[in-house]
Image: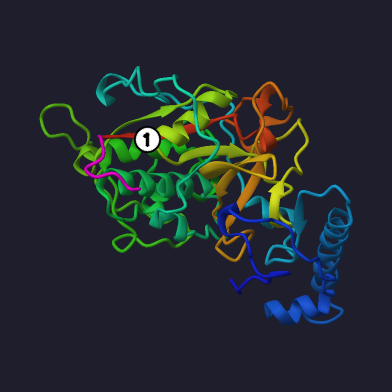
Amino acid sequence: MVLGFKVTLNLALFGVTSSSRTTQSLPSFDSFIQKYERSYEHDSAEYHERRAVYEKNRATAQEQNSRSDKMWTAGVNKLWDWTDAEYSKLLGWDSSVRPEGHSSHASVRPHQTFLQQQGELPKEKLWSNLAMSKQVKNQGGCGSCWAVAASTTLEAHYEIYSGKFRTFSGQQMVSCTPNPRECGGKGGCSGATAELAMEWVLKHGCADETAVPYTATDSACTASNATKTNGTMEMAATSFGMTGWETLPINKYEPLVRALYERGPVVVSAAANTWGTYDSGIFNGCEKDSVVNHAVTAIGYGEEKGTKYWLIQNSWGEDWGEEGHIRMQRHSEEAYCGMNNDPQAGVACKGETDPVPVCGMCGVLFDSVVPHFKPPVQHVV
């Protein structure tokens, strides 16, 4: 992938300062080709197809940037000439029906009081001090958002637990995580869920990225098929502090915001069809009715000039959005709910077609997954 182009410099890293930017005119398609080193033959069929895609995005961006009430700014990036089929490879995750074992069970040491559900929460909690927030991954042309989000979230919790940074191989999750019910897709680069990834890591452990680097392909699994235990039914992941995982209550605001404050980053679902032109600001470009089709990592929440937002770490590289992140408008479940009327378009579990309710901007409250770790060895301030 070539580097992305920013309309202006990111003046607000992780949303701590003003999101206002000066909107410059958007470049022509030929300027885009030169900037991104595309090799389309002039006047070829591909050239005209890509140009039509680009011009559609350009018109959408200009319309957004001309709004007097805009909360976010659109800008050119590496996705602007991608076809719908290519863009869909960045998505491909929907958890309308959860896979079996979606919450902690007997062998996972259930945490019935994981979230205490008491006490007033602060207006802001951002985990952008963690090293993982500076290690934005790029999933490339593989529908591995579910694995990337799971590995990113595990990296955050390990860092909180140990005070040290280590990677978790998203490629190993892609290659090894079974998906017999075809939840979120057919598995690997064809989609799965963060729940399945968490369960596999819990039982088998996980290599770091230096041992199993990311290739964005459906490579063969090199990990042992045997579930590792130490004779006391503790899972392999306990060796690095993980004791279980939990799916938070569906479409509920309080459990997610409290998990972010009390525990750390959380894998969340989102409808990302309209994210392709996002550059900066607080995104509010999803209708209430949304097809949830992407997995990302929520790394905090905050407020800017009276507008509340979620801070999301995406998996499209650091040259997208605000250094690889998007701030998304934050509503309670009562304030912004609609329906996912086409779950199969988001690659739900095989055979599941019934509409399901979704809440929050881009359905961000729909499905949230958080790992359980032992109490921190040392707190990361």
Kindly identify the residue that appears in the image at 60 percent across and 44 percent down: 92
Q: Nearer the viewer, residue 153 or 122?
A: 122
The crowding category of the residue bearing disc 1, from other C-alpha atoms within 10 Å (few below 14, some 14 to 19, many at least 20), is many
Q: Is residue 379 magenta?
A: yes
Residue 112, image x and y in percent? 35, 17
- Element carrying mark 1: strand
Q: Residue furthest left?
A: 231
Total numbered badges shown on the rendered structure = 1
Kindly identify the residue that appears in the image at 83 percent across and 70 percent down: 26
State left or right for residue 208 relative to residue 9. left
245 lies above or below 55? above
Q: Is residue 213 magenta?
A: no
Residue 222, image x and y in percent? 29, 53
Q: Nearer the viewer, residue 332 or 41?
A: 332
Q: Disc 1 designates what residue?
A: 371
Res 204 quadrant in image: top left
Res 202 quadrant in image: top left
Q: Nearer the viewer, residue 77 or 144?
A: 77
Kindly identify the residue that appears in the image at 67 percent across and 50 percent down: 88
Kindly identify the residue that appears in the image at 45 percent across and 35 percent down: 261
Residue 38, image x and y in percent? 70, 78
Q: Nearer the viewer, residue 83 or 59?
A: 59
Residue 234, image x and y in percent? 18, 30
Q: What is the span of residues highlighted in magenta in the rendered image?
A: 375-381
135 lies above or below 41? above
Q: Quadrant location of the N terminus?
A: bottom right
225 lies above or below 170? above
Tell me which amino acid carries mark 1. Answer: Pro
Magenta stretch secondary structure, dominant:
loop
